[in-house]
Amino acid sequence: MKRTVTITDEAGMHARPASKVAAKAGEYDNEITLSYQGRSVNLKSVMALMSLGIPQGGEVTVSVDGDDAEDVLNAIIDTLAEQGLIDG
């Protein structure tokens, strides 16, 4: 399962919300990746996530493999919205 969203926060993907999203991803056993401009990282790693340097307007794709992938994907997307990174 995967979904592409646009980062709307003026600061782009920054440390505090990125850490919340990584923590949410860490709650699941699934393989969860975030892709931006041809690079994919483990969404459970805040350092890897920050290394992408995603600005406002950046299109990212969240991919989830494993059991209950749709539910996990929805939880990650909800967390991105709760953190103000995307329009919810």
Image (cartoon, helix red, strand yellow):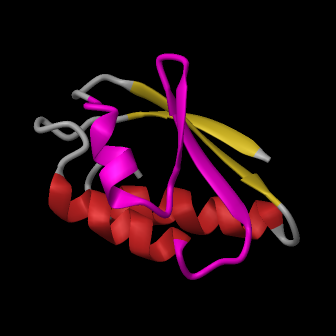
Residue stretch in magenta: 26-54
The single residue placed furthest to the top in the displayed view is: 37
The single residue placed furthest to the right in the displayed view is: 67
Is the residue 7 above or below the residue 20 in the image? above
The question of residue 63 being in magenta is answered with no
* Left or right: 29, with 77 as reference point: right
Q: Position of residue 29 (x, y in %)?
A: 71, 76
Is the residue 57 above or below the residue 31 in the image? above
How many numbered discs?
Answer: 0
Tell me which residue sits at (34%, 59%) in the image: 46
Q: Is residue 49 visible?
A: yes
The single residue placed furthest to the bottom in the displayed view is: 27
Q: Is residue 87 visible?
A: no
Tell me which residue sits at (73%, 54%) in the image: 64
Is the residue 69 above or below the residue 8 in the image? below
Which sits in the foreground, 33 or 83?
A: 33
* Left or right: 22, with 29 as reference point: left
Q: Position of residue 17 (x, y in %)?
A: 25, 61
Is the residue 33 above or below the residue 83 in the image? above
The question of residue 45 being in magenta is answered with yes
Q: Position of residue 48 (x, y in %)?
A: 38, 47
